[in-house]
Amino acid sequence: MPSHPPLTLPSLSGPPPPGSRTVTTDDGVDLHVELDGEGWAGDGTTALTVVLSHGFTARLAEWELQRAALRNRARIVLWDQRGHGRSGWTRLTAATIDRTGRDLGEVLDAIAPAGPVVLVGHSMGGMSVMALARQRPELFGTRVVGVFLLATSAGGLVETGLLGRAVKLVRKVGLLSAYLRFLQVIAPVLERFRRRRTAIGRRVTRRLLFGADDADPADVRLVQDLLEETPWPVAMAFYATFLDHDETASLEVLRRVPVTVVTATHDRLTPAAHGRHIAEALGGTAELVVVPGAGHSVNLTRSDVVDRALLDLLDRVEDTSRRAG
């Protein structure tokens, strides 16, 4: 049984929901942003704002359960990363974690230009948070007062196993960029003939996104539908950034604020060792939450654990603020 009531994700069809905004980036991409929670009616200078960044090939709707848990605690900002959900697309060379980190900073500047902020990131969203820390360290410890990293990695995702050896070989002989360009060229063809909601797709989703004992069939179908909304050209364009992703330099910046790292023991996309590495590198500023039996979609399948860890982080942030005051 799932750990949450039956869940229906908002549809992408029709007009954007109330509380929506558009942030246009410095390279002309329109990012879809939604606002929720308490405190928007005031001047916003003291209200806590929580900014949630979703994972690869998902969209902001993946945070529906956490959105409900946070609604009475803070102002909430959710956004679709470029190429995902309702946000606009980008040239292929800008489909990088470095760019999504800058996008996150522009969303923060436009929507919550004042007051304390907690950044929350799942998978690629966590990588975007780390990229922002590297790019704009002056925000952390001043504007950004807490960070929540969920099922993510600071680097080295493709280093071991058959795929890791193959990537190293292709890179060594100088063919990696050609290989990635090839993937991006064939992606539109694959998209043209792509079939969604297939039994094979469900099995792949079950294998990669769920754990040993958390794969409720309704949740598997829901996640499959969510991920299959993202076109293959988007997925292929971003693929290269995961091969070279390395944000370990940002961890020193994150040590300035309270951080919670949540990792799942059966996560096959960002294995638990990556979360443990982040927590160990951060030292005393970090709390590590390991979720037994769960997979990459832990925010859906173990929402009670994730919600509690997130609310506990807000408590730590408030305690730190009181002590500093």
Image: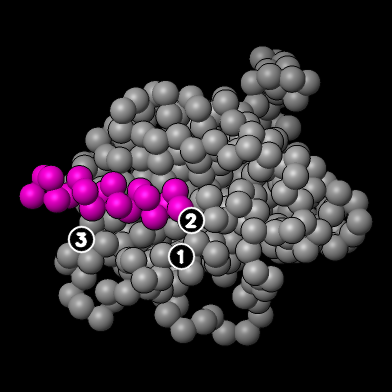
Residue denoted by label 3 = 115
Q: Is residue 66 visible?
A: yes
297 lies above or below 193: above
- Amino acid found under the numbered disc labelled 3: Gly
Magenta segment boundaries in residue numbering: 308-325
Residue 267 in the image, given as x and y percentages of width and height: 66, 37
C-alpha gap between disc 3 and disc 2:
23 Å
C-alpha gap between disc 1 and disc 3:
21 Å
Mark 2 lies on a secondary structure that is helix
Verify CB contact (< 8 Å) between mark 1 and mark 3: no
Q: Is residue 27 visible?
A: no
Residue 256 in the image, given as x and y percentages of width and height: 25, 35
Magenta span includes 263: no
**Residue that appears at 17% across and 49% down:** 321
Within 10 angstroms of label 2, few (less than 14), some, or many (20 or more) residues?
Answer: some
Q: Which mark is residue 307?
A: 2
Horizontally, is 295 left or right of 291 in the view? right
Verify CB contact (< 8 Å) between mark 2 and mark 1: yes
- Amino acid found under the numbered disc labelled 1: Ala
**Residue that appears at 63% across and 84% down:** 14
Placement of the N terminus among the 4 image quadrants: bottom right
The number of callouts visible is 3
- Amino acid found under the numbered disc labelled 2: Asp
**Residue that appears at 48% across and 69% down:** 68
Residue denoted by label 1 = 69
Residue 235 in the image, given as x and y percentages of width and height: 68, 49
C-alpha gap between disc 2 and disc 1:
6 Å
Mark 3 lies on a secondary structure that is loop
* Among the two numbered marks 3 and 2 on one chain, the one whose residue lies closer to the N terminus: 3
